[in-house]
Amino acid sequence: MPGMILHYHPALDARLAEMMNDIRRQSRPGLWPPVSATTLRQWRRRGVLTQEGTFLAEGPDGRLLAVVACTGDDDGPMAAGPCADTRPAGRLRLFGVRSDALDGPLAAACLAAGEEYLRRLGMAAVKTDPVDSRSPERLDFLRRAGYSDPDPSQQSLTMLLGPAGYVRRPVALPAGAYRLRTWRSEDLGAWLRIRNVIFNGSMDEAGFRRTYGPHNFDPAGWFFVCDDDEPVGIAAVVLTGERSAPTRGGYFVGVGVLPEYRGRGLGRALMIAGLNYCVERGLSPVSLNTEPFREAAVALYLKLGFDVIARAYRYVKELT
């Protein structure tokens, strides 16, 4: 087989960014933001790109043709849902293939290298991070490699705020001792506790700091709803795009209320607070992901001006 499979190293970042941007232009021009050196540093910081679990396919002409990034089992998007799978499973965090390499042996070999890495870690299966339905060639590539969508509930919805949603609204809380506030320096423990209850997760402080940092964290966009002084619900707007960009986007994460406080309008109040933050700072686009089985949340987002623009599929493959 001409060409070779390389282990990732930061020295390859310029070539990797060039390939990823070529793939994004080939797939859906303008759909995803460009990949830069800053993007790759963020991916390394979050543990998406690792030297031991990331593989690159190099063609005989020296071009990079594909990338596959795998990590061991950890808390992430696959943890949610009524059909959550408890087997030890690794994650396919990132993969990209040039359109002219989709049917070639190097792309398949690159994916196989990632799967073999997970086998050595003792993983029984590999699960993908969400794969956008607007990139059907990536879905087809996974299906040909033996991946399947395990359950419809494992899909997620990508929702984008439409023009009608870019308005300031009053934040209304129900009667009682409820109040809304933003992030304080001592709030990490409370946020993790609520987040892990709502989403049946196990994120810890290290996972939080890998995911959120100076590049995307603004405490003014992280909200708590409290019963007296006790936080009972959360919503956060993560900044997207480059810090140097004239306009940045907003992405909602961790939106929810503890089970015993649901049905009181607290989730709506949190979302409106987050949307007002986006409007005041001129963030665009504003988006979020959620699962179809969260019917009340989906209905709320639609009422607030979000539209479903894509579905994301989480695929699984047995490794044993």
Image: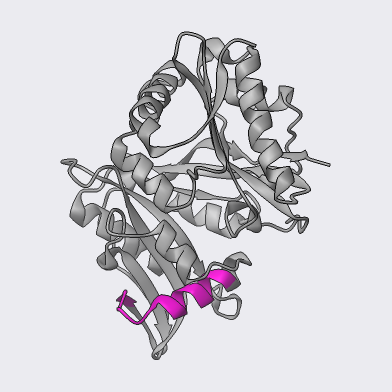
Residue at 31% x, 34% y is 36
Question: Compared with residue 137, is residue 187 higher up or lower down, i.e. above or below?
Answer: below
Q: Quadrant of the N terminus?
A: top right
Question: Compared with residue 105, is residue 180 higher up or lower down, i.e. above or below?
Answer: below
Instruction: Give the magenta part as a residue range.
Output: 181-196
- Residue 287 visible from this viewpoint: no
- Within the magenta stretch, is there residue 189? yes
Q: Quadrant of the C terminus?
A: top right
The x and y percentages for residue 111 are 64, 29
Left or right, residue 240 beside residue 316:
left
The x and y percentages for residue 231 are 44, 82
Residue at 75% x, 51% y is 122
Question: Compared with residue 209, is residue 14 higher up or lower down, i.e. above or below?
Answer: above
Q: Nearer the viewer, residue 109 or 158?
A: 109
Colour setup of the view: one colour
The mark tally for this picture is: 0
Q: Nearer the viewer, residue 319 or 219?
A: 319
Q: Where is residue 40, by image quadrant?
A: top left
The x and y percentages for residue 88 are 75, 55
